[in-house]
Image: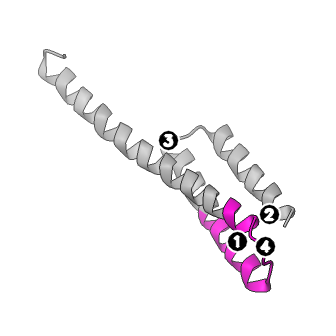
Amino acid sequence: MPKNLSAVKRAQIALRNNRLNKNYKSSIKTMIKKIIALNSASTKSEHHFAKVQFLISQAYSKIDKAAKKGVIHKNTASRKKSRLANLFKLI
């Protein structure tokens, strides 16, 4: 356990940031899982394509914001976006 006040405060801030980063990463993973589930659905109508495209644009936005805030590395963000784009290309 930290003894001086500044070390205690830094530990609290680290815990807070850890929770926020975990929440951000979890939401990105959930969005990607939704897109993959929609991609594997058997019905491929025009409405289906629009919904997938909308979800991919939201995921791109969330991934870019996470990279900008330093939650994930910029190369990781680029890789995730590239894989989503390839998934949409296969639809």
Q: Secondary structure under badge 1?
A: helix
In this figure, which residue is indicated by the disc labeled 3? 71
Magenta stretch, main secondary structure, is: helix
State the extent of the magenta-drawn residues as a range: 36-58
Neighbour class for label 4 at 10 Å: few (<14), some, many (≥20)?
A: few
Depth-wise, is mark 1 or mark 3 nearer the camera? 1
Sequence-first disc among 3 and 4: 4
Is 56 contained in the magenta span? Answer: yes
Toward the front, the furthest residue is 42
In this figure, which residue is indicated by the disc labeled 2? 88
- If the image is split into quadrants, where does the N terminus sit? top left
Residue visible at 25% across and 27% down in the picture: 11
Q: Which mark is residue 42?
A: 4
Depth-wise, is mark 2 or mark 3 nearer the camera? 2
Quadrant position of residue 44:
bottom right
Neighbour class for label 1 at 10 Å: few (<14), some, many (≥20)?
A: some
Q: Is residue 77 left or right of residue 11?
A: right
Residue 86 percent location from the top left of the image: 82, 56
